Image: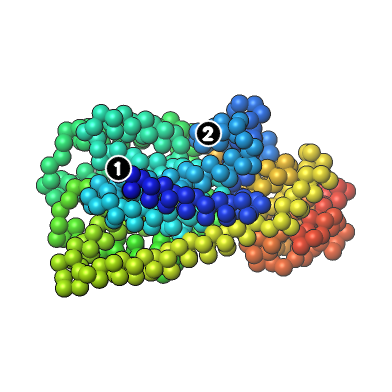
Amino acid sequence: MSKYSAAVLLLIFAVVLSVRLYFAFSTLYFTSDDSYFHLRQVEHIQDTGKPIFDDALSYSGRAFIFNPVFHYIIAFFSLFMPLTIAAKLLPNIFAASLIFFIYLISKKITKSTNVALFTAFLSGFVPVFFAETATRLTPVSLAIPLIFLLIYAFMNIGSTFWLYCYLAVLVLLSFLHPIVSLFVLGLFIYLILVRVESLKQSRDEIEVSIFSIFFILWAQFIIYKKPLLYHGLSVVWQNIPKDVLSEHFAATTTLGAIYQIGLIPFVIGLYVIYLFLFKKKQKDIYLIMAFAASAGLLLWLRFIELKIGLMFFGLVLVVLFSQGYLQFVEIVKKSKVSRFLWLFAALIFAAFLVLSVYPSIALAQKESQSITPDEINALEWIKSNTPPQATIVATVNEGSMVTAIAQRKNVMDSSFLMQRDVAERFNDLKRIYTTTLEVEAVGLMDKYGADYIYFSGKARAYFKTDKIRYADGKCFLKVYDDHVQVYKKLPECRVKTV
């Protein structure tokens, strides 16, 4: 890498990271309920050296099955800086580092430094990836860059250095996040594509591919053996209740997907897929296409959460964009308007600013407002003014905030694995918020030993109700009211069977 390309690449990294950190630190809180689950795990590792696998607060007592590698990484760096800084800074450094791996892959397939640099900049502003990782504490911010590092290492598997790098990253990623399943499927599709197109493949590549597939499957089985035996094949859908399933594996319109991916990489990326499926052959391009097919297939089958699938699919299309942009540059250079190449490049860059950078910032701005100070204040009030053994009713997407911020038991949260009664719990939760019958609400509260109802704007929107309709009765007392309401069920109110 020349000094020029290294300097430009570092400048791109600085720009992407600076914009990310602006949103991260201008937002006082994390902007997803899951972030507080991860934060609580990191805090527990800080205090005890171990994550929380047996949790007395979630579902009022349950076992967790998850990969704690990410939490140990954040906990390690929090030894050298406050956790509040580490939890915002490190995920954004991880996410911004993606540009280096996209640059390397693009340079490999195009042999053009300028094209690779432009592609690296483009990868820093894929709207869905930018918005979903800038203000959240999530393992995805590390897992997705590692997948692209793994792809580049695989492309150079003949080198001893990159072989060892590949194996090290493969092991780390296998125990970091289930998104590694995308890599498994991508390798499998790649092997099929190469065989169908009758392209030569080195023995090292074949052996590493087969080893990777079996190792990742083995690692996932080791981690998720209990949920697999407990739930069967439905573990693929994470035991999510049917009424909640549409949120995790939601469908989206084509325009919605394009907006979240970015119009330029979407159009050019699909064109490159068409070009190399029917007119050209290049093994490295087939490898990238295989991962695009992997993400697309899992999204179509609803085997992967929509936002994660779109992140990966969009970034793969960005890599394919580099090849399409190279084709465009070569055509212009051979034409009579070659002297205006700089103008075409400037127009494409301007279009990218409008169609990718602006949506990234707009989505991040919207995401930064998803959790309000009123909600946090209410949870902190619960922490200070309720008994430590109290159980709080909150929506599924606020349950981890209850356990992390209020430090109280919840009735339900978004971790559904190893829970047999999630459908029943969700229906009961819904009835607590929407029923008009006080006696029914008291009975359901008693069923789960619940003492308080946390009624936020999210609950209003989620259950489409503007108030707790039975709250004016004799059994519930409004104990907090500041845009968010907290209701206490009076202990003398119980439903008795006569």
| Figure quadrant of residue 82 | top right
Circle 1 Cα neighbour tier, 10 Å, few/some/many (<14 / 14–19 / ≥20)? few
- When the figure is inspected, residue 384 is found, relative to residue 338, above or below; the finding is above
Q: Which residue is at the front of the view, 473 or 123?
A: 123
Identity, as a three-letter code, of the amino acid under mark 2: Ile
Q: Position of residue 417 (x, y in %)?
A: 54, 42
Q: Is residue 77 left or right of residue 336?
A: right
Q: Which residue is at the front of the view, 83 or 406?
A: 83
**CB atoms of marks 2 and 1 within 8 Å:** no
Q: Which residue is mark 1?
A: 1
- When the figure is inspected, residue 335 is found, relative to residue 379, above or below; the finding is below
Secondary-structure class at tag 1: loop
Secondary-structure class at tag 2: helix
| Quarter of the N terminus within the rendering | top left
At 64% from the left and 65% from the top, the residue drawn is 461
Disc number lying in front (2 or 1)? 1
Identity, as a three-letter code, of the amino acid under mark 1: Met
Residue 402 is labelled as none
Marks 2 and 1, how far apart in space? Answer: 29 Å
Q: Which residue is mark 2?
A: 73
Q: Is residue 36 visible?
A: yes
Q: Position of residue 85 (x, y in %)?
A: 61, 42
Q: Which residue is at the front of the view, 245 or 486?
A: 486
Q: Position of residue 315 (x, y in %)?
A: 37, 54
Circle 2 Cα neighbour tier, 10 Å, few/some/many (<14 / 14–19 / ≥20)? few
Q: Is residue 193 left or right of residue 365?
A: left
